[in-house]
Image (spheres, rainbow, N blue to C red):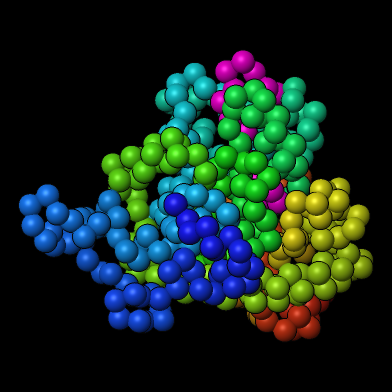
Amino acid sequence: MINKSHKKLHIKTKVVHGFKGYDAHTGAVSFPIYQSATFRHPGLNESTGYDYSRLQNPTREELEKTIAALDNASFGFAFSSGMAAVSTAIKLFSPGDHIIVSDDLYGGTYRIFEEIYKKYGLEFSYIDTSCLDEVFKSFKTNTAAIFIETPSNPMMKISDIEAISTFAKSKGALTIVDNTFLTPYFQQPITLSADLVLYSGTKYLGGHNDTLAGLLVLNDEGIAEKVQLIQKSEGAVLAPFDSWLILRGMKTLGIRLEKQQENAVLIANWLKSNPLVDKVYYPGLTDHDGYEIGKKQSSGFGAMISFSVKNVGMIEKILERVEVIIYAESLGGVESLITYPMVQTHAAIPKEIRDRIGVDEKLLRLSVGIEDSNDIISDLERAMRWDG
């Protein structure tokens, strides 16, 4: 359970200080890395509260309570990767259950649903969750959950979290939100009635492209007990050092995201005015289809941009020519990264779904970093210069 006093603090303060904020035993301001697999018992039937690091570790516990505090949630869990967190959430369901899923989502999530969990009797429907009518029409008698990414990856669609959560609750189903792109700094789905919130902590929460992590937060005690059972039994827990890296990264989450968003707005508008660009997908643009819903449920629009070029021949040139921007998978770090979704992050998505949502051979995804915005724009301008 989180300390109720944390709810009174601004998110800018919470990210800096964490849950405990320092080590009570030594006064260390940087929370220690408890690099121990096991812990000494004082005596028979006595425990310090820590027995074995697969069950709980003080460093991981500080991270778990910190992410819960940031999300205004009661429980937090840290895993070895974002996909381990997704896998744990899906294990809450039983054979025969139906789950509605955003059709525009990370390819790894699609892959684990289709290639792993379908074998265990789960049924998945991929629909445009930014359209409420589609959500309503897709609901079945065996629908147990609605799984949404918002903003979605990579088309930046915005789904109405509160409306979907309210509908799901009326039907006895859960709402799961992948909040990786905005983090609790900009969006807190738990306060919008979502049941579970997932993060790839590898991305913005860590913020430095130096570790893998997954996080899950929720309020329901019964569900928390099930998640804890899965976590300790399967052991896909976040190691102490990696927990410390995420804790350290989150201290600068606010200033990083503010700078990244500031850059993203400038870059999105520059791309929009570029004659070589066909379309720009960024939730912070006023003509974005989800702009008003985004303003209602989020305090920021983030720093992820996707854009389509007019000539497919530009793609290879851009990826080869960028210098400040790094051509690589992943997102959310201090460095600007550019990705070609069709052959990288979304290769597992069937072509018919990619074509339907717009993930084609002309689409690029840009994770905007904290560099000088003029340097990023100059890099894009030089890389995009069309010479036939």
Is residue 162 shown in magenta? no
Q: Nearer the viewer, residue 261 or 170?
A: 170
**Magenta run includes residue 144:** yes
Residue 254, percent from left and from top:
63, 72
Q: Provide residue 69's location: percent of width, then percent of height.
A: 53, 59
All told, the count of numbered labels is 0
Instruction: Identify which residue is drawn at 47% across, 28% down.
Output: 93
The vertical placement of 81 against 358, above or below, is below
Residue 273 drawn above or below residue 291:
below
Q: Is residue 321 visible?
A: no
Residue 159 location, quadrant: top right
The quarter holding residue 57 reads: bottom left
Q: Which residues are magenta?
A: 138-153
Q: Position of residue 85 (x, y in %)?
A: 46, 47
Task: Name the residue at 43% across, 48% down.
Answer: 84
Q: Name the foreground residue: 112 vs 232.
A: 232
- Give the residue displayed 77% in from the left and 28% down from the top: 134
**Which residue of the protein is positioned furthest toward the left in this rendering?**
44
**Residue in the image at 60% along x and 24% along y:** 172
